[in-house]
């Protein structure tokens, strides 16, 4: 009893997950189109079942005509079959077309919805960070797969299975009465008395399919776990292939091909290993379902044969009984026939539910309190931690005013880059209070050591994330010259993967050109010139200094080179913490 109650609770919980994932689209701004398409699909499914009822009746008349050698009825029923078949074809075609159209619209809406949530508020970045949090719930791996594949699988499977279930229910309701009427009663003597079972064929169909459903569940249940695991290992393999392509130069320089080949082989081995288990589980289920289906073909003839040979029914009625039994059996066997699809759908729903839960967890996370009421960047008190909550650094009573040029120093791993992330508002493990200038978000720019450039034209890479047509060719070319990239001034319309095409130093100078183009007031440079020689570094830093001074702003840098210090008037230093608190504390001087 307890186990059955647990299964019922699990079923209710799963149903709730499906509703929570599916309902938003049908309540969205597209709800009337979505509901209209769904209503049309349901109507066509009902019409298809009605056509099956008419064809079942046609079976009786047609085969009786054959048995009676009645040519008039035979040719008349052939003509009637043409009309019935033509109507059924039209219904089938438009049922398929409208269902595919609804799947496409539903997937498009869900993809846009999840892309907005994934890219909004740096969720894509936070989800990746939480993968390294010790003791925290592991976030969904491979979010690209969730959006690109799982949403597609969920929409198609949900619609396909739900319409299939609707068809099964309506078909069962439509044909069970026919089968009950045709099957007659079964009389037998037991314990000294005579007993009669009305609608015997109906009860035999119910018993046959109930046994089949229970056996299919226990035989096919492992597929739920294996389908879930298969999607994960496939995505891991694909993700590592992408990383090899992304870091192809570094791997080639390190002669790391054997290591990458070994790791790719291990990941693909996991793909094959799990897939082998999956196909073995599918083989066991197919053994059962195929035998179950073949037995169902002859089962109604075996049960109804005594009545036919006794003369109680004619050939047409026998064929009608077989057809009606087949429809009832198909309806009751819906679970058996679709168990493989249900297992894959269950795994897909669980993955999307985990993805949804990760967004909700991010929304509930504590954020850094920031205000914008001053013209300076003021750190009243700030505590930063690593993923998982390990204390990293603390700071209090520090400020950056317009006109400042500030260098932040400290050992590697002490939290300098993390401080930048917290000030930018993207680090989730930050507590405290920071006052930022009112125009900070609109006029701030960060120059990382490894900048990002989109695939496209050079003008798009230079203007990113703004539209390229916002700047004239003259402005773009001047920014490139000021960043010591005069050779690129004639390539603004060239399309390329600039993050791979350019050397490390050229990438850093292109990022600096982007800053010179956009003229931020607050500029943060994190080892932004580490790939440049001293002469080039001196030139670009002089120009960055002049830029922030012209904007009445500030330049804040992280760098290990002593030569960079000469371009800054002030310094903050990360020192070892005291008293068992943060590992480092940030102090002026």
Image (cartoon, grey):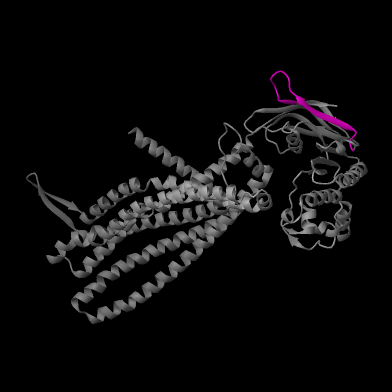
> Where's residue 366, x and y in %?
66, 32
Task: Answer with left or right where residue 262 lies relative to residue 538.
Answer: left
The answer to whether one can see residue 173 in this image is: no
Q: Nearer the viewer, residue 7 or 412?
A: 412
Does the stretch in magenta take in 583? yes
Seen in the picture, residue 144 relative to 138 is either above or below; the reply is below
The quadrant of the picture occupied by the C terminus is top right
Q: Would residue 257 appear left or right of 315 to someone viewing this image?
A: right
Q: In the rendering, at what x and y percent does residue 585 appear?
A: 76, 25
Is 75 situated left or right of 580 in this image? left
Residue 4 horizontal/vertical position (percent): 35, 37
Answer whether residue 108 is visible to the viewer in this image. Answer: yes
Q: Residue furthest left?
A: 192
Of the 4 image quadrants, the one containing the N terminus is top left
Indicate yes or no whether the magenta region holds residue 309. Answer: no
Give the residue drawn at x 22%, y 56%: 201
Q: Nearer the viewer, residue 530 or 332?
A: 530
Question: With respect to residue 218, does 66 lie above or below?
Answer: below
Quarter holding residue 578: top right
- Decide which of 325, 247 is in the foreground and name it: 247
Region rendered in magenta: 567-584
Q: Is residue 6 left or right of residue 544?
A: left
Q: Quadrant of residue 302?
A: bottom left
Q: Tag count in the figure?
A: 0
Task: Tell me residue 450's x, y (percent).
Answer: 74, 46
């Amino acid at each position: 009893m307890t186990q059955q109650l647990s299964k019922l609770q699990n079923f209710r919980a799963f149903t709730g997950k499906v509703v929570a994932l599916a309902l938003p689209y049908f309540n969205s701004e597209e709800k009337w189109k979505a509901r209209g398409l769904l209503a049309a699909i349901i109507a066509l499914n009902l019409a298809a079942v009605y056509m099956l009822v008419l064809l079942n009746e046609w079976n009786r008349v047609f085969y009786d005509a054959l048995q009676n050698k009645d040519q008039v009825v035979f040719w008349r029923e052939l003509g009637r079959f043409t009309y019935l078949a033509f109507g059924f074809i039209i219904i089938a075609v438009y049922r398929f077309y409208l269902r595919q159209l609804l799947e496409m619209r539903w997937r498009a809406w869900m993809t846009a919805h999840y892309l907005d949530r994934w890219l909004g508020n740096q969720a894509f970045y936070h989800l990746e960070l939480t993968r390294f949090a010790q003791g925290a719930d592991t976030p969904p791996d491979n979010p690209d797969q969730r959006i690109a594949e799982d949403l597609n699988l969920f929409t198609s499977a949900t619609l396909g299975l739900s319409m299939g279930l609707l068809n099964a229910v309506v078909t069962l309701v439509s044909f069970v009465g026919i089968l009950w009427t045709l099957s007659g009663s079964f009389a037998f003597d037991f314990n000294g008395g005579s007993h009669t079972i009305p609608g015997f064929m109906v009860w035999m169909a119910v018993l046959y399919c109930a046994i089949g459903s229970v056996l299919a569940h226990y035989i096919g249940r492992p597929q739920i776990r294996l389908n879930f695991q298969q999607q994960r290992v496939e995505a891991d393999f694909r993700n590592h292939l992408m990383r090899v392509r992304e870091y192809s130069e570094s791997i080639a320089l390190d002669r790391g091909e054997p290591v990458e080949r070994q790791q790719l082989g291990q990941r693909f081995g996991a793909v094959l290993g799990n897939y082998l288990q999956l196909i073995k589980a599918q083989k066991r289920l197919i053994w059962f379902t195929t035998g179950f289906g073949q037995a169902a073909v002859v089962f109604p003839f075996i049960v109804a044969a005594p009545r036919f040979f006794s003369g109680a029914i004619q050939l047409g009625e026998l064929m009608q009984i077989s057809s009606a039994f087949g429809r009832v059996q198909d309806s009751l066997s819906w679970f058996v026939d679709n168990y493989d699809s249900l297992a894959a759908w269950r795994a897909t729903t669980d993955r999307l539910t985990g993805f949804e839960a990760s967004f909700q967890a991010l929304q509930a996370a504590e954020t850094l309190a920031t205000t914008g009421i001053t013209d300076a960047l003021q750190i009243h008190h700030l505590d930063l931690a690593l993923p998982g909550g390990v204390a990293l650094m603390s700071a209090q009573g520090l400020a950056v005013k317009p006109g400042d040029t500030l260098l932040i120093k400290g050992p590697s791993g002490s939290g300098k880059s993390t401080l930048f992330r917290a000030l930018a508002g993207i680090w989730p493990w930050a507590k405290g209070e920071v006052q930022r200038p009112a125009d900070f978000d609109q006029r701030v720019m960060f120059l990382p050591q490894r900048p990002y450039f989109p695939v496209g034209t050079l003008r798009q890479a230079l203007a990113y994330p703004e539209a390229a047509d916002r700047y004239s060719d003259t402005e773009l070319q001047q920014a490139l010259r000021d960043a010591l990239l005069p050779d690129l001034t004639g390539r603004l319309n060239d399309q390329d993967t600039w993050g791979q095409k350019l050397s490390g130093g050229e990438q850093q100078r292109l990022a600096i050109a982007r800053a010179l183009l956009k003229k931020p007031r607050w500029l943060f440079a994190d080892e932004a010139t580490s790939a440049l020689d001293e002469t080039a570094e001196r030139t670009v830093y002089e120009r960055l200094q002049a830029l922030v001074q012209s904007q009445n702003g500030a330049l804040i840098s992280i760098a290990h080179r002593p030569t960079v210090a000469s371009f800054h008037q002030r310094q903050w230093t990360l020192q070892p913490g005291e008293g068992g608190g943060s590992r480092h504390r940030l102090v002026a001087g």
